[in-house]
Each structure stands twice: as structure tokens, then as C-alpha cells.
Image (cartoon, grey):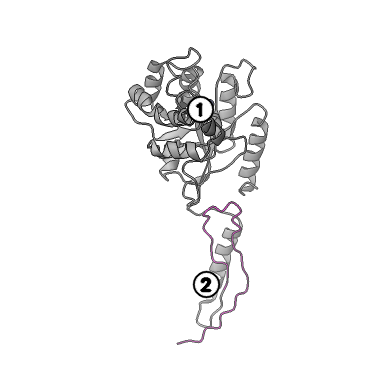
């Protein structure tokens, strides 16, 4: 047995700021009496690759964007014109981001850290034209979260026939409550049955529109208390989504991820510039968010 005189000479561990599963290459170089001379050099080069933050495999992050309507009326911070929305999508693409189906991300089929998943809440009537004129030509997948009752009963929203058509075109359809009431703890304390209704009733109404039971749920107003979360889970949904203005990349392989409170980033007029700044900085540095 040859004598091995092992002594660490240097260390380049990959500083994984975002907790993502970047592959960490060897952090030590060992020298051995029987080791060929070039072996140390190979390990040294591999260490440099790791230090350069080159993702080897295993990284899977998605930023879930949450849009609302496309009137271009200028009356709401959540509303953009179709031309503004198209320009934003093209800018995301130009920055090197890919739009992936949300369901692929949930199924662990997405790799890389430059993924965006597009979601649109509320079932506004402009969803139909935006799909055919902006999303479909760019082959961008979308998940539409619709309030089960309101769709088909409100002239500002999609008709049942339009939801059916969009589902047939491949849009994923998730639930966004039934009447779009709050599902917070405060709302539950006031009227528990209203919160429960938001969770239990949209499933069947969406099934009647699309022929598929929805497994994705987005809380109305982007938030829920433990009672609302529990009601959604009991109603048979596999995933439920919150929403806020913060940019939060999501790792679906993270065991600590709450499947009933997955964060999304609401796109407002007032935060779109900072979203682009952050995404641009992220791409150029290849480092994660602070
Ligand atoms: Zn909403």
C-alpha cells in the first residue's frame, strides 16, 4: 500500500447563494506519491470551473409572473396594453429567459435558472385576444387562473365558450376562488363558509367548462390564512399559489417549499422596471437574488 501524503492545498467551493443545487466540484487538491503528475492539474481546472459559477446540472428555478388584464386603459397599475405586454415578453426573451409551462416546472421537468412561467389571474375578457395575438405567435405557454362563478357571469370577464376554446388551445386553467373573495384568516373569522366556498366550488364549474378537474389554485388577492390553505388542500388541489410584488425564484425540488403557498411575482406598472433590472443583473452575474 503506497503511502499517501494528503494535504489540502487550496479550496474552491461554489458559493451557492440561492440554496440551489448547483453541482459543487472538488474543493481540495490532494497530492499523492503514486498519483500521476497531471491529476492534480485536472482537479485544479475542474475547481476553477466550479469557482466560475458554471451550473453543471441540477439547477431548476422558475420565476412565476402574475399578470392581470390587457386593456391599456391606464386606470390600473395591474393593466397593460397588448403592445406593452408584447414588448415586455420580447424583452424577457431578449434577456435570455425562457417561458416554460408551469405544470412542467411542478413536475420537475424544467432545468436551468433562467425560466419564467406566465400566469394570468381573474379571467379578464382581454385574456382571449392576448392569447391569440401575443402569446400563441410567440409560443409562450400560460396558466389562466379564473374565478369559477364570475367567468360567464360578468361582462368584463371571459365567456364560458372562450375558456373552453383557450383550454382546447393548450392553456392550463386553474381556479382563482369562486366569487373571488378573500381567503385570509381575518375573512375566515368573519365568515368561515365564504372562505370554504372559495375552495370547494370552483372545481366543478371549471370541470364543466374544460372537462378537466383543476389541480392548481391561486388565492384571490394573492393571500390565504391556514384555514384557506387547508380548505384548498382538502378540496383536492395539488398546488396553490400566493402572489406579491417581490421577485422570488422558486425551486420546485426544494423540500421546504410549501406546495400550498408557492410565491408568484405580480407585475405592476410601478415594479416592471425593477423586475427588468433584477433579471438583467441576474443574467449578467449568474448569481442568485439577494
Ligand atoms: Zn384576482
Category of crowding for the residue at label 1, using alpha-carbon neighbours closer than 10 angstroms: few (below 14), some (14–19), many (at least 20): many
Is 138 rendered above or below residue 54? above
Q: Is mark 1 within 8 Å of ligand 1?
A: no
Whether residue 139 can be seen here = no
Dominant secondary structure of the magenta stretch?
loop
Secondary element at image label 1: strand
Residue 232 found in image quarter: top left
Category of crowding for the residue at label 2, using alpha-carbon neighbours closer than 10 angstroms: few (below 14), some (14–19), many (at least 20): few
Q: Residue visible at 57% across and 29% down?
A: 90
Measure the C-alpha gap from mark 2 to mark 1: 53 Å
Secondary element at image label 2: helix
Question: Given this view, does label 2 or label 1 mark the residue nearer the observer?
Answer: 1
Is 232 rendered above or below residue 169? below
Q: Which residues are magenta?
A: 1-29
Q: Quadrant of the N terminus?
A: bottom left
- Residue that label 2 marks: 39
Of the pair 152 and 40, the residue shown nearer to us: 152
Whether residue 110 sits left or right of residue 209 in the image: it is right
What mark, if any, has residue 120 been given in the picture?
Answer: 1
Q: Residue visible at 51% across and 14% down?
A: 156
Q: Residue furthest top?
A: 155
- On the image, the x and y values in percent for residue 6 come to 56, 80
Whether residue 74 sits left or right of residue 143 in the image: it is right
What mark, if any, has residue 266 been given in the picture?
Answer: none
Q: Of callouts 2 and 1, which one flags the residue occurring earlier in the amino acid sequence?
A: 2
Q: Residue furthest front?
A: 190
Of the pair 221 and 74, the residue shown nearer to us: 221
Any magenta on residue 6? yes
Of the pair 145 and 230, the residue shown nearer to us: 230
Whether residue 6 can be seen here = yes
Asked whether the beta carbons under mark 2 and mark 1 sit within 8 Å of each other, the answer is: no
Q: Residue furthest left?
A: 211
Amino acid at each position: 500500500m503506497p503511502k499517501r501524503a494528503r494535504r489540502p492545498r487550496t479550496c474552491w467551493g461554489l458559493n451557492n447563494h440561492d440554496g440551489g443545487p448547483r453541482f459543487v466540484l472538488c474543493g481540495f487538491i490532494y497530492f499523492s506519491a503514486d498519483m500521476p503528475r497531471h491529476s492534480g492539474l485536472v482537479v485544479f481546472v475542474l475547481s476553477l470551473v466550479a469557482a466560475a459559477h458554471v451550473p453543471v446540472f441540477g439547477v431548476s428555478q422558475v420565476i412565476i409572473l402574475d399578470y392581470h388584464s390587457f386593456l391599456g386603459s391606464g386606470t390600473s397599475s395591474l393593466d397593460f396594453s397588448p403592445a406593452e405586454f408584447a414588448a415586455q415578453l420580447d424583452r424577457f426573451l431578449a434577456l435570455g429567459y425562457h417561458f416554460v409551462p408551469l405544470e412542467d416546472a411542478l413536475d420537475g421537468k424544467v432545468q436551468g435558472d433562467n425560466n419564467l412561467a406566465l400566469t394570468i389571474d381573474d379571467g379578464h375578457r382581454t385574456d382571449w385576444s392576448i392569447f391569440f395575438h401575443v402569446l400563441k405567435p410567440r409560443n409562450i405557454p400560460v396558466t389562466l387562473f379564473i374565478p369559477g362563478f364570475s367567468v360567464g357571469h360578468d361582462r368584463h370577464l371571459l365567456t364560458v365558450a372562450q375558456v373552453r376554446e383557450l383550454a382546447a388551445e393548450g392553456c392550463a386553467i386553474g381556479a382563482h376562488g369562486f366569487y373571488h373573495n378573500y381567503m385570509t384568516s381575518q375573512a375566515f373569522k368573519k365568515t368561515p363558509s365564504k372562505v370554504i366556498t372559495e375552495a370547494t366550488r370552483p372545481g366543478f364549474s371549471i370541470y364543466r367548462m374544460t372537462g378537466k378537474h383543476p389541480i392548481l389554485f391561486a388565492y384571490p388577492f394573492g393571500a390565504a390564512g391556514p384555514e384557506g390553505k387547508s380548505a384548498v388542500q382538502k378540496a383536492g388541489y395539488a398546488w396553490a399559489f400566493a402572489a406579491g410584488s417581490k421577485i422570488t425564484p422558486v425551486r420546485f425540488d426544494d423540500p421546504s417549499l410549501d406546495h400550498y403557498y408557492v410565491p408568484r411575482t405580480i407585475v405592476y406598472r410601478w415594479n416592471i422596471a425593477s423586475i427588468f433590472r433584477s433579471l438583467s443583473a441576474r443574467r449578467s452575474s449568474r448569481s442568485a437574488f439577494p
